[in-house]
Amino acid sequence: MSLKNKRVVITGVAGGLGRKTAELLVEHGARVVGIDVREPGDAGRVGRFLRCDLTRREELQPTIAQALDFLGGGIDILINNAGTLSLQDAGIRPTTSSRNSVDVNFWAPWTLTAELMPYLLHSHGKVINIASLFAYINAPLIPSYGAGKRAVSAFSDSLRMQYHGQISVTTMYPGFIDTGIHTDAVRQGLSVAKIIDIRPLGLKLLSFEESVESAAHGVLRACRRNYRDVGTTRLGTLSLWFARHMPRFVDAFIRTRVNYLVRRGTLKIELDQPTFP
């Protein structure tokens, strides 16, 4: 399917996967509205940029109106990509950051999809929800992120079932991409990059890292095709299969890997003092 003149709204365009995907869509002739709470550098490359905190309804309504006005009153593709990652202890009460994580990663895409649903139904459009491999690959200290991304997957499934034949719904599962979303986790000592980079005797044996470029091209493919559940790369799709069909093996690998890195001192995890709402 050609993307020329397709009307696209994509969230989370300030950097990383969202920014690169928006740039590729523009290059392929799509009419793009990019939304983020932060303004990207050289915003013109992501189409029409609109600043918005998607968790605040008073900001969302005028942003949607501006987006529809720019796109000529309709939309063909919605890409819910915006996300946030923070660390929490799953054994304590939810913190302010826990609640914000679920708001951004789950409630915001549901709300935006609902607001745009009449226009998507009219165009027989497509919703692409960007979840994460962490929706199925379990890891310590990310309870709100994992829960939010798994909820997005369940939301996609329900939306797909209810509106079958009227819109198409794809859930995508990026693996680790070295972008700013990991900054807070790295500051507190949890580096996913170190967990997935296997270097016995100092020699790089295996890495599960995905490049921004390859992941963005994966999203572009999803815009053209009717996938159900898919990784942003072939390796990501394979990892998703293992996570779903061999969860005990994947759990054991992650647990063993994290414990090994902590014992070696490679990971030194110090969580921020929790602030309760």
Image: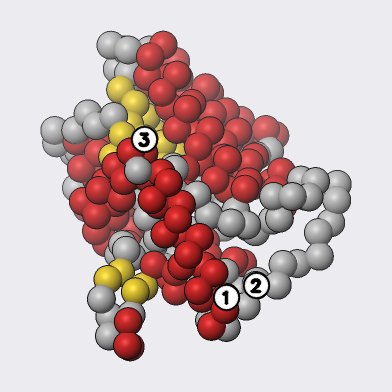
10 Å crowding of disc 2: few (<14), some (14-19), many (20+): some
Element type at mark 1 = helix
* Residue pictured at 52% horizontal, 22% vertical: 114
* Residue pictured at 26% horizontal, 46% vertical: 237
Tell me if I can see residue 172 in this picture. Answer: no
- 8 over 163 or under it: above or below: below
**Gap in angstroms between the C-alphas marked 3 and 2:** 31 Å
Q: Which residue is mark 3?
A: 171
Badge 1 amino acid: Val
**Is 108 left or right of 157, judged from the image as shown?**
right
Percent coordinates x, y for residue 271 in the rendering: 72, 67
Percent coordinates x, y for residue 95 in the rendering: 78, 50
Percent coordinates x, y for residue 68 in the rendering: 44, 30
Q: Do labels 1 and 2 touch, CB within 8 Å?
A: yes
Q: Which residue is mark 2?
A: 269
* Residue pictured at 33% horizontal, 88% vertical: 202
Earlier sequence position, callout 3 versus callout 1: 3
Badge 2 amino acid: Ile
Q: Which mark is residue 69?
A: none
Q: Which of 208/256 is in front? A: 256
- 219 over 140 or under it: above or below: above
10 Å crowding of disc 3: few (<14), some (14-19), many (20+): many
**Is 99 left or right of 11, judged from the image as shown?**
right
- 180 over 53 or under it: above or below: below
Badge 3 amino acid: Thr
Q: Which residue is mark 1?
A: 262
Quadrant that contains the N terminus: top left
